[in-house]
Image (cartoon, grey):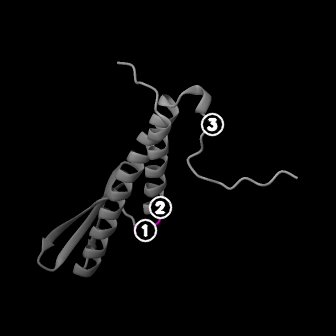
């Protein structure tokens, strides 16, 4: 199935969405991969892969809460980046050739002297 070229309005809409997503990336304060599991009511463990091997570390309840938030942030960031990739690919592959030089960010042009 062949995609139809993007209209100028759709291009502008995709660029605006990309800009919103890129602004959201700055809101993530802490990031981590892995998973947090309860070992008992007061003991937690954080597990992740390091160079292909599973590594586990014990955590207090407070540290477990912080790590869970960092992991959730990382997953949210991954979703945003995935959407940004999709937008980029759509803009590159479906924008007509004569308008291909459109930029994702608006930079003011300097005056010619």
User: Is residue 50 visible in the rendered structure shown here?
Assistant: no
Q: Are marks 1 and 3 in contact (CB under 8 Å)?
A: no
Tell which circle, 1 or 3, labels the residue nearer the N-terminal end: 1
Where residue 46 appears, as percent x and y from the top left, is 27, 66
Does the magenta segment cover residue 28?
Answer: yes
Is the magenta region chiefly helix, strand or loop? loop
Q: What are the residue bounds of the magenta stretch?
A: 25-30
Residue at 44% across / 41% down in the picture?
Answer: 87
Task: Tell me the distance, in whole angstroms, between the alpha carbons under discs 1 and 2.
Answer: 8 Å
- Position above or below: 51 against 72: above
Where residue 100 appears, as percent x and y from the top left, is 59, 33
Q: Are marks 1 and 2 in contact (CB under 8 Å)?
A: yes
Task: Tell me the distance, in whole angstroms, between the alpha carbons under discs 1 and 3.
Answer: 29 Å
Count of marks, rendered view: 3
Where residue 55 appears, as percent x and y from the top left, is 32, 59
Instruction: Judge from the rendering whether residue 97 lies leftward or rightward of residue 79; answer left or right.
Output: right
Between 58 and 13, the one lying in front of the other is 13
Between 61 and 104, the one lying in front of the other is 104
Which element is circle 3 on? loop
Q: Quadrant of the N terminus?
A: top left
Q: Which mark is residue 101?
A: 3
Tell which circle, 3 or 2, labels the residue nearer the N-terminal end: 2
Q: Counting other residues with Cα less than 10 Å from the Cα at mark 2, is it few (<14), some (14-19), or many (20 or more)?
A: few
Residue linked to disc 1: 27
Between 18 and 38, the one lying in front of the other is 18
Residue at 30% across / 69% down in the picture?
Answer: 69
Which element is circle 2 on? helix
Q: Which mark is residue 23?
A: 2
Residue at 34% across / 67% down in the picture?
Answer: 70
């Amino acid at each position: 199935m062949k995609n139809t070229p993007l209209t100028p309005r759709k291009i502008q809409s995709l660029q605006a969405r990309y800009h919103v997503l890129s602004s959201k990336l700055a809101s993530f304060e802490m990031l981590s991969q892995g998973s947090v599991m309860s070992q008992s009511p007061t003991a937690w463990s954080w597990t992740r892969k390091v160079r292909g091997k599973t590594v586990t570390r014990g955590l207090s309840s407070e540290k477990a809460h912080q790590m869970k938030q960092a992991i959730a942030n990382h997953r949210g960031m991954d979703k945003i980046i995935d959407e940004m990739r999709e937008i980029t690919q759509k803009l590159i592959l479906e924008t007509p050739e004569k308008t291909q030089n459109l930029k994702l960010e608006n930079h003011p042009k300097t005056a010619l002297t």
